[in-house]
Structures are given as C-alpha cells and as structure tokens.
Amino acid sequence: MANSDPALTLRQVTHVYVNDKGASLAVEDLNLTVQRGEFVSLVGPSGCGKTTVLSMLAGLFLPTRGEVLLNNRQVKQPSTLVGYMLQQDYLFPWRTILDNAALGLELTGSKTRAAVEKAADLLAELGLPGSGARYPHELSGGMRQRVALARTLATEPEVLLLDEPFSALDLHIKLQLEDLVKETLRRLGKTALLVTHDLSEAVAMSDRVIVLAANPGRIRCELTIPDSIRQASPMKARQLPEFQPLFDQLWAELDAAEKAGWEGSESDEG
Ligand SMILES: Nc1ncnc2c1ncn2[C@@H]1O[C@H](COP(=O)(O)OP(=O)(O)OP(=O)(O)O)[C@@H](O)[C@H]1O
C-alpha cells in the first residue's frame, strides 16, 4: 500500500564532488529510511556530509551512485513535496510579513485567495496573529524564523528539511521555537530531517538521531529516542531523568566519530 512507503530513503548513496581542483568523496554508501511522520536528526563533525544529504533530498543534484527516494520515487529535481528551512530566514525586507509567508505559494503558482488566507492562519497559529501587514525589520529574530516556518508550511510540503534553523537564535528564543516546531510538525503529521550541531536539540526534538562520521561521510550509529522524551516538549524533555544519559551517549559517539574522521583524513594524506 502506497501509504506505508517510507517518506525518505537513501540506498547505498555515494556522492563525489568534482571541480577544477579534482574529485572529493563527500559521502559513501549511506543507507537511511525515514518513515512518514518521523522526526530524524543528523549530527556529525564538520564536513561529514549533512548538507550534501539534505541537498540531494531537496533534488538540487543527483548522487554519484545509489538512490535517493521520496515516497519511493527517485528524487531528480526540487519538488513542492519538500520544504526547506535554513539558519537564515531570507525574508524579503520590502515585502510585508504576509507577502513573505505567501512567497512559496506565488513561486509555485498556487497563490489563490484561500491559500493566502491559510498563510495568514498559519502566521496566527505560529504566534504572529495580526502581523501580516508588518515588515521584517519590525520583528525579532525568533519572530522572523516563525515567518520563515509559515512560508515553508504554506505550500503544504510533506517533508521538511531543517538545516540548523535555530542556531542563530538566543537560547531562550531557540527553546521556544524548538517547542513550537516539534508541536506543529507533529500535529500536521509532517516528516522532518533536522541537521544540527546542538546535541541536546537533537535528543529533545527527534524520534531518532543519526550520527555521521567524516572522511568520507558515513553513518556511524543511530540512537532511538524513548517515548517519554518524544512525547514531551523539547523544553520539558531536557528535564527528564533519561535525557542526560542519552545526551552523554551521543556526545561519546560524536567524539569517537570526530576521532575516526581525523584518522580517515590522515590515511588519505598518507
Ligand atoms: N561544492 C563542493 N565542492 C567540493 N567539495 C565539497 C562541496 N561541498 C561540500 N564539499 C565537501 O564535501 C564534504 C561534505 O560537506 P558538507 O557541506 O555536506 O558537510 P557538513 O556535514 O554539512 O559540514 P558542516 O557541518 O561544516 O556544515 C566536505 O568534505 C566538503 O569539503
């Protein structure tokens, strides 16, 4: 049955970047399945291929070898089924908040009156009621990221690719936004893949955390988050007794992944 298909699949994915300086093996033999409605985080040392993975899932380029699948179909180009949220909000300063939130609708040719009303409803649901006529410079960083989230959700993607969307925010705002994003994506039944350097964010938000190692990028291990943490808001999850041991385990894996990466790069040089 089509509905039981995984949302995302990486099957023996290898990617080599080729440019005028030569070829560089970014990721090798990655296998990953993300079920519909699942929230999965990718963590790993710098250069382990997190952005490369998101870019292939977004259809920006094809893997050199292997398959990248969305709903069991090969990803060959960007699709409205996939939404992207980045560290920077990329709001246009000359457009109102509502026009920014409706930008994706405009670009995909689906800016109907009903769709724009839905974008306004989304802004209200995300804590920005009545702000549609304001401009980005009138909003705080956290509010601007809420607009970016509304813009991403307005086109009704099935899958959200979240590339460090909270990393530029102050801690307090970041925690509030983590709560909002986890609750909203769960309520809407979205599938999410989050790239983050913040291990506590990965544990607090995810159903599973995948640890990558570098040189070349590969999957080192995966951590399944227990129900008690999954069902709590990220802020409350951090206070549960089972949180710290998971954080410590992830820290140790990342430490080992970094050391393994150094060994990989030394053997490349040798
Ligand atoms: N356009 C490119 N051309 C050549 N090599 C690239 C290119 N983009 C990335 N790489 C290389 O591919 C590897 C994976 O890079 P990628 O940006 O995916 O890692 P990352 O895990 O997202 O890193 P970071 O955490 O620092 O953002 C790195 O070795 C990087 O130098």
Image (spheres, rainbow, N blue to C red):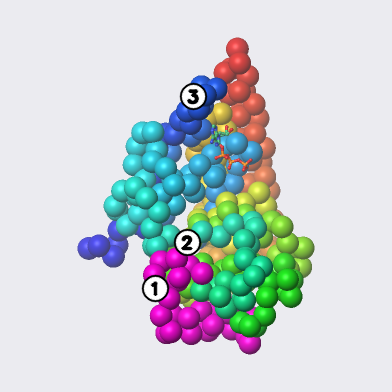
Q: Main secondary structure of the magenta part?
A: helix
Q: Is residue 120 left or right of residue 109?
A: right
Q: Can the viewer see residue 96 in this picture? A: yes
Position in image of residue 13 (x %, y %):
40, 37
Q: Quadrant of ligand 1?
A: top right
Q: Nearer the viewer, residue 16 or 136?
A: 136
Q: CA distance from mark 1 to mark 3?
A: 40 Å
SS category of the residue bearing label 2: strand
Of circles 1 and 3, which is in front? 1
Which badge, 1 or 3, is on the more N-terminal residue? 3
The residue segment tinted magenta is: 103-130
The residue pinned by badge 2 equals 83
The residue pinned by badge 1 equals 110
Q: Residue at x 71, y 57 (%)?
A: 168
Give the amino acid at mark 1.
Answer: Ser
Q: Nearer the viewer, residue 66 or 236?
A: 66
Residue 23 marker:
3
Quarter in which the N terminus is drawn = bottom left
Q: Residue at x 57, y 18 (%)?
A: 268
Position in image of residue 99 (x %, y %):
56, 75
Q: CA distance from mark 3 to mark 2?
A: 30 Å
Are there few (<14), some (14-19), or many (20+) residues within 10 Å of tag 1? some
Position in image of residue 7 (x %, y %):
37, 58
Q: Can the viewer see residue 8 in this picture? A: no
Which badge, 3 or 2, is on the more N-terminal residue? 3
